[in-house]
């Protein structure tokens, strides 16, 4: 039975959720919205926002649909080391393929797609690190075997990594299957996915010898064959299980099972096949599954979801799955452990990829928020400590002074706009001072202007003349910035202001109305947090963070119509 969701419920739920926030720059805490005039900037009125943030229940459906996207293989266009032919990402792993075999990097901390935690981000709780790498080398295989792409998929992948556009790789196609012809005499090797599970078949022509097939397994702490006949590989990140080989022949349109089992000699694995008709083709079909995987995509950590007017869903987050493992035939056999931002667009049905774009540099890059305009362009924010994070038309093109890449406590916020195809950077800028600056939320208006909020420990965080608070109050302040992504350089920062008192203030979400007023939520521990006459609560009540639950119906969201994402299991009503 399909779940029915009324668009009126969306609006009501959003209002209820906004009434549970912990800090609001709205009629209720400060007495009036943070308008363009209050921030020291006068701007013309603009159209209402093109899209609305989806409700929590719908976000959960988007998360599940994202986790269920089919496995897709990319030809190596320079996004992986030389000697690798194809790469793919699945449930809790990234895989590289070559004529010599395959390599799989397991996620060290597999987790489901989820909303990011402000506290976790503030304390640097994300620790992806390096997962173990397993290498399956085809013993005695022909390393000149021809690689073939099969079953083109509609989605593409983009790599906007580093500051040099010549090194970016965009429009990389994806395929449902790839094959190596005559990897052994008379034997084709075909890779494909069943959902997120990697599978591969050895397809033997009549007369081919299955005894020539052998795998040398490297990187596992131990191998064993259990009572069910499955091959279990023990690793530091959990167990990788290769199911008992399914061996069969098609005879008269009917699949006939052939008895088979694994044979283990140390770390060398082969398949013993029972009696079969050698005058017919034979298929040997193992299946891989990562037993400790909980959901999501490799070590991907999803932080934000947006939905456009057509029902397409956009997901932003952080991944280390661009660190593809090297195969035995690769020119380089080591990988650096860095995180990058990912932006994924799914089709309105929620069952296919439109694009997946990776954004980042040589350090740690974290995606925390996303918004979409009426033209289908994604606006992304987060923070980075990369010294070569990609920028374009930037207000701040270089990382702020201080420690270099991968240095804790020296992040800069970033704001980026992708084109509608996800393959180019329309705008990209850093925003930060000499200490830690992290953006948490982003909204966009109908004029392609982005509004960003987060928190900073920098006394030299960029502020604009006439802003409501131009001086840092210590302990960590929130910030609110308006970024015109149609402009460039200093003209692109319409306004920027601190928002905080003498203790810790953390902003984590932002919304705007049709007049360009910004509404910010978060938490504060500051007894002197700026409050205005007429606010619901003007004084700090104590505790580690104050606000949220005391707001009652004061927050506003703007005059927009809700949009539903047309995902499986949902119907629109009303």
Image (cartoon, rainbow, N blue to C red):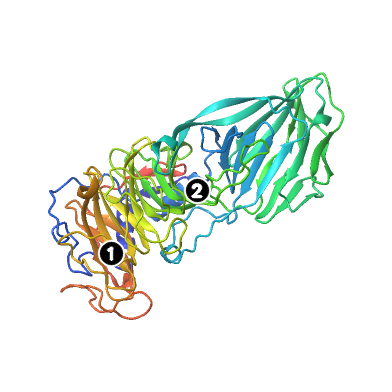
- At label 2, counting other C-alpha atoms closer than 10 Å, the crowd grade (few under 14, some 14-19, many 20 or more) is some
Q: In the displayed structure, would residue 214 be above or below residue 294?
A: above
- In space, the residues marked 2 and 1 are separated at their CA atoms by 41 Å
Name the element at disc 1. loop
Q: At x 50% / y 60%, what residue is drawn?
A: 126
The residue at which mark 2 appears reads as 64
Label 2: which secondary element: helix
The answer to which of 403 and 81 lies nearer the viewer is 403
Q: Position of residue 291 (x, y in %)?
A: 66, 51
The image position of residue 167, as x and y in percent, is 44, 37
Sequence-wise, the earlier of marks 2 and 1 is 2
Q: Which residue is mark 1?
A: 460
Which residue is farthest right? 275
Residue 168 visible to the viewer: no
Give the quadrant of the C terminus: top left
How packed mark 1 is, by other alpha carbons closer than 10 Å (few <14, some 14-19, many 20 or more), is: some
- The residue that appears at 71% across and 47% down in the rendered structure is 241
Vertical comparison of 402 with 252: above or below:
below
């Amino acid at each position: 039975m399909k779940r029915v969701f009324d668009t009126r419920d969306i609006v009501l739920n959003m209002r209820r959720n906004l009434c549970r926030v912990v800090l609001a720059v709205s009629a209720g805490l400060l007495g009036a919205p943070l308008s363009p005039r209050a921030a020291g900037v006068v701007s013309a009125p603009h159209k209402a926002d093109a899209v609305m943030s989806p409700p929590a229940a719908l976000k959960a459906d988007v998360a599940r649909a994202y986790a269920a996207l089919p496995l897709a293989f990319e030809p190596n266009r320079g996004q992986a080391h030389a000697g690798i032919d194809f790469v793919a990402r699945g449930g809790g792993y990234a895989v590289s393929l070559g004529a010599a075999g395959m390599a799989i990097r397991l996620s060290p901390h597999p987790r489901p797609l989820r909303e990011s935690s402000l506290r976790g981000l503030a304390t640097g709780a994300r620790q992806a690190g390096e997962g173990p790498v397993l290498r399956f080398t085809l013993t005695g295989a022909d390393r000149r075997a021809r690689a073939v792409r099969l079953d083109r998929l509609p989605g593409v992948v983009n790599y906007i990594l580093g500051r040099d556009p010549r090194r970016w790789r965009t429009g990389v196609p994806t395929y449902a299957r790839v094959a190596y012809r005559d990897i052994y005499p008379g034997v084709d090797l075909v890779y494909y996915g069943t959902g997120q599970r990697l599978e591969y078949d050895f397809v033997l022509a009549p007369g081919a010898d299955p005894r020539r097939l052998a795998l040398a397994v490297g990187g596992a702490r131990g191998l064993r064959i259990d009572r069910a006949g499955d091959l279990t590989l023990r690793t530091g990140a959990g167990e990788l299980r290769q199911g008992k080989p399914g061996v069969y022949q098609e005879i008269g349109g009917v699949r006939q099972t052939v008895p088979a089992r694994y044979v283990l000699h140390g770390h060398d694995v082969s398949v013993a096949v029972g009696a079969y008709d050698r005058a017919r083709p034979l298929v040997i079909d193992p299946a891989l599954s990562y037993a400790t995987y909980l959901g999501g995509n490799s070590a991907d950590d999803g932080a934000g979801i947006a939905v456009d007017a057509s029902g397409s869903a956009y997901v932003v987050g952080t991944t280390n799955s661009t660190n593809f493992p090297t195969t035995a035939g690769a020119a380089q056999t080591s990988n650096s452990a860095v995180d990058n931002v990912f932006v994924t667009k799914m089709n309105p049905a929620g069952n296919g990829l439109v694009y997946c774009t990776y954004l980042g540099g040589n350090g740690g890059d974290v995606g925390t928020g996303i918004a979409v305009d009426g033209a289908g362009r994604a606006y992304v924010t987060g923070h980075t400590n990369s010294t070569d994070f990609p920028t374009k038309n930037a207000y701040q093109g270089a990382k702020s002074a201080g420690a270099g890449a991968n240095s804790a406590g020296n992040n800069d916020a970033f704001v980026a706009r992708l084109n509608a195809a996800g393959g180019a950077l329309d705008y990209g800028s850093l925003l930060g001072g000499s200490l830690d600056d992290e953006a948490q939320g982003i909204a966009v208006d109908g004029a392609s202007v982005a509004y960003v909020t987060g928190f900073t420990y920098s006394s030299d965080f960029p502020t604009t003349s006439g802003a409501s608070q131009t001086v840092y109050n210590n302990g960590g302040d929130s910030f609110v910035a308006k970024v015109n992504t149609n402009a460039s350089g200093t003209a692109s920062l319409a306004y920027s202001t601190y928002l905080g008192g003498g203790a810790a203030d953390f902003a984590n979400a932002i919304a705007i109305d049709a007049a360009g007023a910004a509404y910010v939520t978060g938490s504060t521990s500051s007894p002197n947090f700026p409050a205005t006459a007429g606010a619901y609560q003007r004084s700090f009540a104590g505790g580690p963070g104050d606000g949220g639950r005391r707001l009652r119906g004061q927050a506003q969201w703007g005059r927009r119509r809700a949009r539903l994402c047309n995902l499986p299991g949902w119907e629109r009503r009303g």
